[in-house]
Amino acid sequence: MQAVVVGAGVVGSLIARELTKYNVNVTLIEKEEDAGWGVTKANSAVIHGGYDDPPETIRGRFAAKGNQMYTELSKELGFDLKRIGSYVLAFNETDRPYLEELLEKAEKNGVPGCEIHDRNLILQKNPNINKEVIAGFWCPTAGITEPWMVAISAVENAVLNGMDFRPGEKVLEVITDGKNGRKSVSGVKTDKGLYPCDILVNAAGLFADEIAEMAGADCPKLHPRKGEYILLDKKLGKIVTNILFPVPSAVSKGILVLPTVDGGILLGPTAWDMERDQKQDTSTTSEGLAEVKAKTTEMVENLDFSATVKIFAGLRPESPQKDFTIGSTNIYGFINAAAMRSPGLTAAPAIAKHIVEEVLIKELAFDINTRDDFDPILPPYPTLSEDDPEVWAEMVKKNSDFGKVVCVCNKITEAQIIEAIKRGARTVDGVKFRTRASFGRCQGGFCLPRITEIISRELNIPMNKVKFRSGNTELLSGKVRK
Amino acid sequence: MREINLDALVIGGGAAGMAAAVELTKNGCKTILIERDGNTGGVLNQCIHNGFGLHVFKEELTGPEYADRYRKIIKNELIDVHSQQFVLEVNPQKREVITVGTEGLTCYKPTVLIMTTGARERPFSNLRIPGSRPAGIYTAGVAQKFVNLQNYLPGEKAFVLGSGDIGLIMARRLTLEGMKVLGVAELMPFSGGLARNISQCLDDYDIPLYLSTSVVKVKGKERLESIILMDFTPDTLQPIPGTEREIKCDTLILSVGLLPQNELIESFVDIDPVNRGVIVDSHQQTTHPWIFAAGNNVAVYDLVDFVTLEGIHAGKSAAEKIKNGFNEVEKINVTRGENVGAITPLQCCLDDKEFKFYIRPRKNIKKGRLLIGDGIVNKIEMGLKPSEMIDITITAKHKANIREIGLNNLKVEIQEVE
């Protein structure tokens, strides 16, 4: 049995890994140079509680379940997950009924431990919240992660279990035939090769509607919704301890203030609907950034924007029905995992399991069985901390490259960068997202030339062929002198 | 863990650190200089242009030559340099410094710690300029390292944002290496770099300098394709509508300021919000008595020569503390008056020891009167600019005056004179 998954975002990567647990040959095709670089890369990085999606929606069916699955998944794949809990904050008496509504929905969706907290308790935990707060809806199971690491580690684990990963390949055509008297998927053609298949999972993010169109499969039209963010330096990291939402608007969950897993503070996102031809437009705007600044300073005091480390924008796919499109289509073997708007990251593990167990095996009766040699564990990335110098010393004894600090802001060593390249990083961003090197306050001011040099050496390519990320993003144009 | 007891540990092997280590050793203190890079010299190693050393060596040297002079002194004085040592922790309670290097961990236990950790460049994202984030945007220091040390060019057509000295130097450097440099934009109505650099790096190569101008947007999905410039009001620094213009370029070089680096100690010493550096007294001692500091982590200086002189000063003061013990000296605070920006030191010890003030004017002043401490210093200075620090020595005689009048703070101001 041959399966092709299109799109190595968090959804596609987890589906591909799930399929690798079975006697299926899996190929994962990704147009970017790495996993997790589309919608997955730039969102709030929140594993939502799953309390606010209406129970009758697909989102409601999968969010809470997905949230629960993250604990085991993070243990298996070694990515960071911190269940720091979330608040939806009410600043007006008129917002109080909304909190009560959430409590009811949380119960229906099976979200444990939710409560309404009063002002004092909220301010005790987060003294910088605007003092006009009156109450908050507390969800203890909400957490934060690095979404790209969920995708990257799932891919790396699947590759160790035999999956074929094809980054930097663009799907040009989906081939169908009429075997067994029905229109069925039979292969995928990319700019680099042809992949015959019996199953095609369409997890192409913003482009899922275009992939479906290639096959003539059903899929709602998708448009991008832009979310702009501001990331503040670690030195402000203690300013809030929980994920903070305002009472939401009709279009989004509102603009959040939350800690990141590596200690920074993330502010955002905006929710601006864009045209269908703007699926690549991840530019930030002065209006968007101003909105983030205005809304977050209403909710939290003492945000110091001079400590800005990064500004960025992400795009999330939105469909007319404002819900996920998951499951079989009019083309046999063509499965959608599309329109993964919020809370797509949260729901992804549950969707991966559903697609294999419920859709492929039960509904479509594909004859596939679990393997007994699947190893769910990805050896963790080596991490070092100044809080534990003895461990660091041990690592240096084994490999002296652990004694060479390359990224001074986040204290990332040459050994960790080499490990990232061995595991699949081919670009500066590939190294950055795996190791957090140059993620810190100097944004590569010290380490960019060093990282470029290490990539050039390890991949045995000239310096001027080292790329920043996908496409024509070479950092250097050529030699000064021969 | 290797443990080392010593008189003085100097962290950071750039100009200030090398000078401090030499001075300490000359004064008989057991000193180690630690450096995170493989070699001492710091940023001097990549500054291959000349213009260094006029004050210290009385001749014009390139950065690597200047660093080399000091390396030779270090060698002759048999100073211990521990290179490729990265500091994990500075512990003020235990008075220990823990580092990691290729041979493992080291715990240094110095009587005195001298911080000479320099500055870093303000990154692009800190400016919050909207637009895409394509390849081709580099700080001047990164571009300089690519070109001068790694032998690679960043692109073909460059624009420079910010008129700091390193940006001006790189405009010339990239032009000499065959790139087209289209211009330099400066948000302020005056240049951030030295007059000699404007003339030798821009004017000589017909590179235009646009004052009161900045980049408001960058464009390009993969590689940088263009930037949008706008004019700004000189007083309120607001963009002037209708002045947008697009410039096609594949490289944007940033020279938008240096930030003193004090991450290792900022939780237990005082930092000055204007200098953005660690506060020192006229002995270069920080607000934690164990720690001295000198160089760009105190305030960003114009010339490496000044940094060296401050390093020597710190080394000398620290050596004296090591020899004579930490006697409390009475100090008064230095306060900023009119037209004074960055200034160091920020505390004046009321002993007889000479020291130098370094003062950055806030704006261009044709003729100004520098007043320190109710006229203890009263001096006319011509052609003052924010890009050029005033350095002025406070002598034993000045200090005697301060004590005599009984000043409880030392106000420094620059009055405009008609």
Image: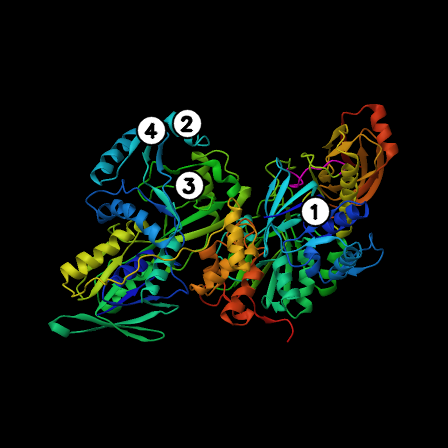
Give the answer, above or below, for where A231 lies relative to A157.
Answer: above
Name the residue that disc number 4 marks: A117
Give the answer, above or below, for where B285 lies relative to B213.
Answer: above
Callout 1: residue from which chain? B
Which stretch is magenta? Answer: B273-283
Residue depth check, mark 1 versus mark 4: number of the one nearer the observer: 1
- Colour setup of the view: rainbow
SS at circle 2 = loop
Residue B388 image point, x, y percent: 75, 47
Say which amino acid is labelled 3.
Leu
Q: Between residue A222 and residue A88, name the one nearer to us.
A: A88
Q: CA distance from mark 1 to mark 4?
A: 51 Å
Name the residue that disc number 1 marks: B10
Q: CA distance from mark 3 to mark 2?
A: 19 Å
Q: Which numbered disc, 3 or 2, marks the residue that appears first in the sequence?
A: 2
Say which amino acid is labelled 1.
Val
Q: Which numbered disc, 3 or 4, marks the residue that appears first in the sequence?
A: 4
Say which amino acid is labelled 4.
His
